[in-house]
Image (cartoon, grey):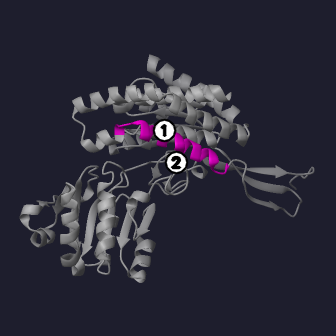
Amino acid sequence: MSQLAEHVLELGRRARAASRRLATIARDRKDAALFALADALIDGEGAILDANARDLVAAKLKGLSAAMIDRLSLDTARLAAMAQQVRDVAALPDPGGEILKEWTRPNGIEISKIRVPIGTVGIIYESRPNVTSDAAGLCLKTGNATILRGGSEATFSNQAIVDALRAGLRNAGLPEDAIQMVEGTDREAVRLLAEMDQYLDLIVPRGGKDLIESVVRYARMPVIKHFTGLCIIYLDEAADADMAERIVVNAKCQRPGVCNAVETLLVHRAAAAKLLPRVATALRERGVELRVDDETWRLLGAENCVPASAADWDTEFLELILAVKIVRGLDEALAHIDRHGSHHSDAIVTEDEATAERFLREVDSATVYWNASTRFTDGAEFGFGAEIGISTDKLHARGPMGLEELTTYKYLIRGEGQIRE
């Protein structure tokens, strides 16, 4: 057995032991531990920001895009926000032990269905160091132990954050092994984690297509995928022009390198002359490159656009690039979203309630918006405190994964000597 395989198995053994202890710890102790984790992040600011600076130097040498570097970057304000999100998780109701349903059978046995921790959760992710503290905090609150495997571009940042979090667990008297990280950047660790079903109960990959497909290929336990965020906004013929501009600019430009940023804009042909020049001007003023279909090209002028390729309609750009297409109406918009979207977050801008309700009903995505930016697809914005990821699956969890999505359930049956006849 390789040294890496032994390392990953040891993480699994320790996580399993920690998960058993966490499952019996009362809410007040877990909440106190979460506050200790938040304090440890602030206390560790110097070490964490120094580690992040090392990652940023390496990222720039590798030529990562500005959007990717923004995802990677930490500063005092972002670290404070990370700590606050951990505190926000502590303030949320604990779903553990919640009685989902209870009933009595004719023979007198009493049955209860209650929420319980999943157990041990493996989380594989890329780029964003804040995922480290978000995932650890949510798992701890729900009584799950977690094994983290971050991207190579954030190696030093993630390790420094985990060191701080484990110090917080020590200070709170909880098992440090509730939060662990795979050492090194060897990609073989992904396969080893995915195959470790004797210790991992769930694995959550969030990142690019290659990572997701690799985990799915090897996984011997359930997988919840945080897949591509190819988000689409449709501007209907009844869209308010001011609202359309504000929503599209926010969805594309606020943080273009995140999964809930818009990547494709569809515009009703009847409103294109009114909406598109205005929206396009606002986007170009912010440095957005527009990749457009032939009809948009003729409307906006060749000097302001780039012809879209067939691949652009299926691309999550994660930078200041937006694919733009004029469509005949709602039916064509729905067909485009179904064919090219990633079932993550899609939005309609319209003042027509009937059209909006049809869009909300027929778009098969985890989150569907009417007159709001796709940037709200986020655990904190949904009131979940933080998130493990945005699930594009349909079973068990869909959309932002908060506390409830990190639980399963079991049945408790109480009797008085009944036997089955």
Q: Which mark is residue 386?
A: 2
The question of residue 78 being in magenta is answered with: yes
Which one is earlier in the sequence, the residue at label 1 or at label 2? 1
- Rendered position, 166 above or below 304: above
> What's the residue type where badge 2 is placed?
Ala
Q: Verify CB contact (< 8 Å) between mark 1 and mark 2.
A: no
**Mark 1 secondary-structure assignment:** strand
The question of residue 141 being in magenta is answered with: no
Q: Quadrant of the C terminus?
A: bottom right
Specify the quadrant of the image occupied by residue 144.
Answer: top right
Specify the quadrant of the image occupied by residue 119.
Answer: top right
**Is residue 188 shown to the viewer in this render?**
no
- Residue under the image location 63 percent in, 25 percent down: 170
- Residue under the image location 30 percent in, 51 percent down: 256
Judged by its main secondary structure, the magenta piece is: helix
Task: Please identify, in this view, whether the residue under mark 1 or under mark 2 is nearer the observer.
Answer: 2
* Residue at the spot of label 1: 123
Residue 307 picture location, percent across and down? 12, 61
User: In the image, 196: left or right of 95?
Assistant: left
- Residue under the image location 14 percent in, 72 percent down: 295
